[in-house]
Image (spheres, grey):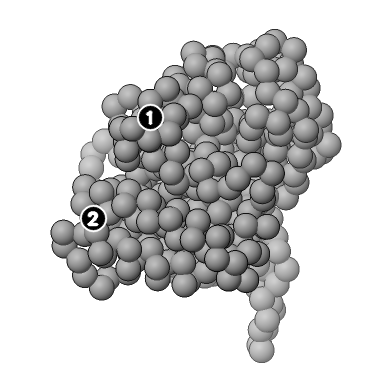
Amino acid sequence: MDNNITFQDIKKGNYSSIYHLLYQNGKLSKQEIANQLHLSLPTVTQNLVRLEKEKLIEKSGQFESSVGRRATAYAISPQARISIGVEIQKKTVNILAIDLLGDAFQEKKLVMKYSNEERYYKELSESIQSFISSLDVSQEQVLGIGFAVQGLTSNDGKKITYGKILVSTGLDVEVFSQYLPYPCIFLHDAKCAATTELWVRKDIGDAVYLSIGTHLGGAIIINNQIYMGKEGHSGTVEHMTINPGGPLCYCGKRGCMETYSSVNALLESGETLDIFFEKVRSGVVSYVKRWNTFLDYLAFSMNNLHLVLNREFIIGGHISSYLIEEDIDILHEKTKEKSAFPNNDRFIHISSLPAIGVPIGAAIPFVQSFLGAI
């Protein structure tokens, strides 16, 4: 036994182990906790009393029993702490609250045109505070607020290091935290979506996540973690050059993957994804041809990425809910045709995310930090 381990360390370890066991199992009796953790009943009882007093757990009914008294069921209190996710786009803002299980339990959408001005940050901060006040929670219960933005952020979440879509390069999170009494961080929206994917699916391991929305975004997942890279722009596949003489990208360069594999690149003026895919599924020739060309370019890029990162691909973003397995089959075939190492292994998958995956992913890091510290 390590001589540096103190009695207090052991007590903290038991406290943490019991909480996490309940978190992972949903409901357990006192005896089941003791059996699984090889602890005495008095030790379990003492820690359950403490956790319940701190409102981190609660009694949750009783287990069925054919003999004797029915055992009390214990479970975590999901809303003992909450986290807020805010997705900022050009014309809208989506605010939601998640509990300790990562489940969204309240959401509010605002129509707010982004403007890099003090009045915008103050007005949005007031709306966020009003939203939190409506939840009937104390300030101590709120772990923090994650702001998902269409731009790259510093690894500590304090600044937007590259923000040409919202014209916000260099913006400090202080523009919000000066008005809000909670920890605040900025996060890249595509990486938020990938974070939620990791939360929902525990078996990803390594993958490339492509968020195909109005704009394209990407994230690299290594060992079930978002890999940020030295300067935070790892995974920004949207600015990988596909054709040096191609369309002008918002970054100022030409022929980026963004200009071929985003919803902006797919749709014509006034179109919606609903209309486009209705035409595609109905077999309208011009739409089927345009969709086929889009998949060609996507396969071209995915093959290049697959040569560098021979891992699974997950396609998310606004387009994912319109995709069917036939589209994925076509992508596999097109990628295989372009590959120097063709095989029949399936490596492209459709995201399992809910539509609100980005703001959920903006809120999750605070929950992860809380769970890691308890």
- Which secondary structure, mark 1? loop
Where residue 125 appears, as percent x and y from the top left, is: 73, 22
Where residue 83 appears, as percent x and y from the top left, is: 63, 38
- Residue 41 seen in this snapshot: no
Residue 215 lies left or right of residue 207; in this view the side is right
Three-letter amino acid code at the position of disc 1: Arg
Three-letter amino acid code at the position of disc 2: Asn
Q: Which residue is mark 2?
A: 310
- Which secondary structure, mark 2? loop
Q: Of 339 and 4, which appears nearest the observer?
A: 339
Residue at the spot x=45%, y=53% of the render?
294
Residue 281 lies left or right of residue 258; in this view the side is right
Where residue 22 appears, as percent x and y from the top left, is: 55, 59
Q: Is residue 213 above or below residue 290?
A: above
Residue 90 lies left or right of residue 136; in this view the side is left
Q: Which residue is mark 1?
A: 254
